Structures are given as structure tokens and as C-alpha cells.
Amino acid sequence: MSQANRFPTTPALLSGDACPCPQGPGTHAVPALLPSDGGQPIRVPRPQRAIALPAPAAEEEWLPPLPCDISEGPSDIMVGEAGAHLVQSRLMRWGLSTHAAGPGTPYDVLTEAGPAVGLIRLQVKTTAQPPRGRCYRFRLTRGFHRSPRGVFAYRAGDFDIAAFVVLGLDRVLFRIFGRPSFSATPAEFLAADAEKLSLRRALAGLMARRGVMPPADL
């Protein structure tokens, strides 16, 4: 067959024209027959049909899950560690150097508050539970119910300042060591500057207990 008879002599189909095949018009795109520079039509390859992708799933469906929310977890140790780290984070943000205490000590965090105050021992009590009634309630006791020694009270001089953490609110309040329990409403935890103000009041009380005159900015 000659080169001139390889293609039909009917007018060339332009890309996007309806397909004259038996399947009916508009069923798929057709290759265009366009004239070449030599006057002969050339066949343009058929464009690839777009593949319809499924709609992306909601983000929560494909993000990797976490083991559990800490408020739902069984580990009191993890709750306590989270509270101690929160206290250290706050103190460091306020310019105080902090260190985690060793195991078995009656306090959780050590911080240096300057030459006027000196070294401070903080006991951290943390809750991941909602308030009971109107308040979050804490008891200053040591040990665990299933441990050989059980639960027992702190002695005078075991630590200097108590830090009470509510993980659900991401807040902490500080009190000088004295009473065996503490309670506060969510509003008291969330009040403006409550965290820093409670620490300054606790430092002032500690300085008075140690016989040191607190500076004017406390």
C-alpha cells in the first residue's frame, strides 16, 4: 500500500472530537489525525485516561495512634512523672535551674532560687482525674497502698514547697509545706498569673520560715 493510502481521505479528526466508534459518542477521547508538514496525516497517541482516586480518608483514620490518653492509663508512675516534668518546665521558663531528685527521696525536684533563698526541695503531687465536686483534692502522703510500707505521712523537713499539678488543665499551683492536704477549684488553677504568683508566695513563706527577709519583688 502506498504511503498516501495508509490513512483515510476524510477530514482529519481534531483532538477532543466525538468518537465515531460503535460505542457511541463521548465515550472516550480519540486520537487526533493532524496533517504533517509533508501533507500526510500523522497519528497522535491516545491520551491516558485519568484514574479516579478514592477520596482521602479523614486525617484521624490514618495518623498513627498513641497507646492511650494518660488520664485513661493505669500507671500512677507515668502520671507522677508527667507532673514532675511540667513543674520543671515551668521553673526553667521562669529562669530557675532545676534537677530531678533521685529515687527514694521525699521530694521530686530540686531548684536553686538564688543566694537569698538557696536550694529548694519540691514535692510534686499530680492528678489526671476530673475534679471531685467543685475542687481538685490532693493529699500529701508517701508510698503506695500495695507497697510493704503502705501509705504514710511526710515528716517536717522532708521538703520545702509542694507543687500541685492538674494534667487536664496543664496547670500547677505551689504551696509552702505545712498542711497535709490541698484543694482548689478549676478557676483557681486557671486564674491569670496564678502559677507564678503562687510560687512567689510560697518562696516568701519559705524565706520567712528560714529567717530571711524576702526581697521587695516577692
Image: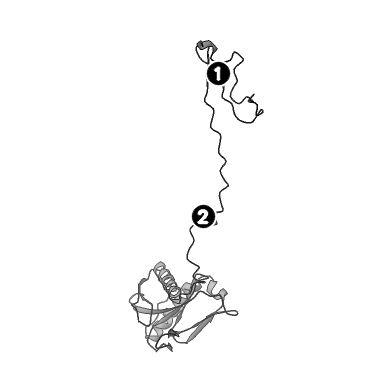
Q: Amino acid at mark 1?
A: Leu
Q: Which residue is mark 1?
A: 34
Callout 2 environment at 10 Å: few (<14), some (14 to 19), or many (20+)? few
Residue 175 in view: yes
Locate the C terminus and report the quarter of the image it occupies. bottom left
Outermost residue toward the right in this view: 24
Q: Of helix, strand and loop, which one carries label 1?
A: strand
Q: Position of residue 214 (x, y in %)?
A: 40, 80
In the picture shown, does residue 84 fall above or below 16?
A: below
Q: Quadrant of residue 217?
A: bottom left
User: Which residue is painted at 37% across and 79% down in the image?
Assistant: 121
Mark 1 / mark 2, whichever is N-terminal: 1
Q: Nearer the viewer, residue 139 or 97?
A: 139
In the picture shown, does residue 31 fall above or below 54?
A: above
Q: Which residue is mark 2?
A: 62
Give the total of numbered labels: 2
Residue 117 in view: no
In the picture shown, does residue 162 fall above or below 54?
A: below
Task: Compute the Cα span from label 1 to label 2.
Answer: 48 Å
Callout 1 environment at 10 Å: few (<14), some (14 to 19), or many (20+)? some
Q: Of helix, strand and loop, which one carries label 2?
A: helix
Instruction: Decide if residue 215 is on the left or right side of residue 133.
Output: left
Q: Position of residue 48 (x, y in %)?
A: 53, 32
Q: Position of residue 20 (x, y in %)?
A: 64, 24
**Chosen colour scheme:** one colour
Disc 1 to disc 2: CB gap under 8 Å: no
Q: Amino acid at mark 2?
A: Trp
Q: Which mark is residue 88?
A: none
Q: Position of residue 38 (x, y in %)?
A: 50, 11
